[in-house]
Image (cartoon, rainbow, N blue to C red):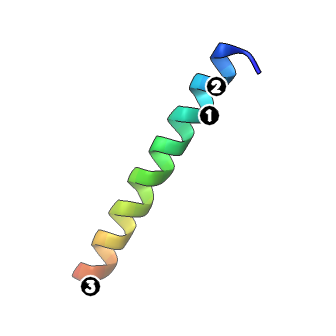
């Protein structure tokens, strides 16, 4: 894998973590 691809995968993982955290937060508020 190239450096660019690795960076892209890392960003995707961070975004996925943020999205799931936000979803859990919203679910607990409802």
Between tags 2 and 3, which lies in front? Answer: 2
The quarter in which the C terminus is drawn is bottom left
Q: Would you place residue 24 above or below residue 11 in this image?
A: below
Residue at mark 2 to residue at mark 3: CA–CA distance: 36 Å
**Which badge, 2 or 3, comes first in the chain's sequence?**
2
Query: In the displayed image of the protein, which residue is found farthest to the top?
Result: 3
- Which percent across, then down, holds residue 5? 68, 23
Q: Is residue 27 above or below residue 5?
A: below
* Displayed quadrant of residue 8: top right
Q: Cα distance, mark 3 to mark 1? A: 32 Å
- C-beta proximity under 8 Å, tags 1 and 2: yes
> Of the residues tagged 3 and 1, which is closer to the observer?
1
Say which residue appears at 50% left-offset and 51% top-offset: 16
Task: Kindly indicate whether the residue at mark 3 contacts the one at mark 2 (C-beta within 8 angstroms).
Answer: no
Asked if disc 3 and disc 1 are in contact, CB closer than 8 Å, the reply is no
Provide residue 18's location: percent of width, then percent of height. 39, 51
- Image point 64% across, 25% down: which residue? 6
Label 2's element? helix
Residue that badge 3 annotates: 30
Task: Name the residue rendered at 65%, 15% in the picture.
Answer: 3
Whole-Å distance between the Cαs marked 1 and 2? 5 Å
> Around disc 3, counting alpha carbons within 10 Å, would you say few (fewer than 14), some (14 to 19), or many (20 or more)?
few
Residue 6 bears which disc, if any? 2
Compared with 10, 30 (above or below) is below
| Mark 3 vs 1, N-terminal side | 1
How many numbered callouts?
Answer: 3
Residue 9: numbered disc: 1
Left or right of 26? Residue 3 is: right
């Amino acid at each position: 894998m190239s450096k660019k691809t690795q960076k892209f995968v890392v960003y995707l993982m961070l975004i996925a973590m943020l999205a799931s955290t936000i979803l859990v937060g919203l679910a607990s508020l409802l």
